[in-house]
Amino acid sequence: MHGRDLRYFVTTAEELHFTRAAERLFVSQPALSKQIRMLERQLGAPLFERDPQGVRLTPVGAALLPHARRVLAAWDESWAAVVRARSEQRATLVVGMSTSPGRGGLLPAIRSRFTALHPEATVRLRQVGWEDPTAGLADGAADVAFVWLPLPAPERYAWTVVAEEPRLVAMPDGHRLAGHEVVDFAELLDEPFLALPEAAGPLRDHWLALDARDGRPVRVGAEIAGTDETYEALVDGRGVCLLASGNAPLLTLGGVVTRPVRGLSPSRLALAWRAGDRRPLVQDYVRACRQATGDPSA
């Protein structure tokens, strides 16, 4: 028995009129009648009573109808799932980031695992300014994003931590503390700091280390929204800044040094996505990320 035969039967049962059913099915009335007769022969019983007063379901037809509808509904749902999966395989996954999450070949390791699952999908990296701490998740410009924690409105997102790194301080190489091997954060309390834009919210506070200041106000020497701006502000002596140890090579290009800071909690880099986003491309990228980082929950 073919799904087409069940669809012909259900449509005819709903119309109780062969001509109207044929019109709905875009087939000729004789072709429909022929298919119904073939189905009846397969089942060994008539499905419709045909007389001058019209068409009626037989007891066998009435018994078959609800089951036929369920079979067709299940088939339609499965076909829709196939279409969605094919579409998603050909789709583009946008990965947002504000700084490169290089860190030991992390991106290639994730990509190879993800591509094995979705060979037809395209992964597009999107650089986002530091004024958006969600790296494109908040406005839908990114499907997943490498972000620094904490995130604003954390209930809107889910994440998996990919790196935990100490916070360093970057300063001009002529700074009074540049000769220290390790700097106590207490020695930085009166220094002007380079700050993320206010739109960065709790992430701005994190890189200003408000959690370690015991309520003492911070001096902001300048606002920075990118790596180049930060480097220029450091060389110009407008302030010092905290950064994750993995990002130190981005700033130590000459004239700038970094030093470990005693008394600060580490920074955490995470792959984040919108809470409740169950799309296969998103979830498989997350899974690939967890496998690449050795996360036991992968």
Image (cartoon, rainbow, N blue to C red):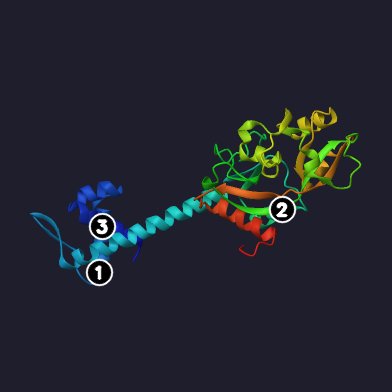
Q: In the image, residue 186 lies at what x, y percent?
A: 78, 42
Q: In the image, residue 28 lies at what x, y percent?
A: 27, 49
Q: Quadrant of residue 53?
A: bottom left
Q: Is residue 259 above or below residue 55?
A: above
Q: Is residue 180 above or below residue 196?
A: below
Q: Secondary structure at mark 1?
A: helix
Q: Which one is closest to the eye, mark 3 or mark 1?
A: 3
Disc number for residue 57: none
Q: Judge the density around disc 3: few (<14), some (14-19), many (≥20) Cα neighbours within 10 Å.
A: many
Residue at image coords 72%, 47%: 101
Return the residue found at the far bottom.
44
First-in-chain label (2 vs 3): 3
Q: Which one is closest to the eye, mark 1 or mark 2?
A: 2
If the image is split into quadrants, where does the N terminus sit? bottom left
Q: Which residue is mark 3?
A: 10
CB-based contact (under 8 Å), mark 3 and mark 1: no
Whether residue 36 sits left or right of residue 134 in the image: it is left
Q: CA distance from mark 2 to mark 3?
A: 60 Å
Q: In the image, residue 177 lies at what x, y percent?
A: 87, 39
Residue placed most toward the observer, 72 or 39: 72
First-in-chain label (3 vs 1): 3
Q: Quadrant of residue 72?
A: bottom left
Residue placed most toward the observer, 211 or 42: 211
Q: In the image, residue 292 lies at what x, y percent?
A: 69, 58
Q: CA distance from mark 3 to mark 1?
A: 17 Å
Q: Which residue is mark 2?
A: 164
CB-based contact (under 8 Å), mark 1 and mark 2: no
Residue placed most toward the observer, 162 or 75: 162
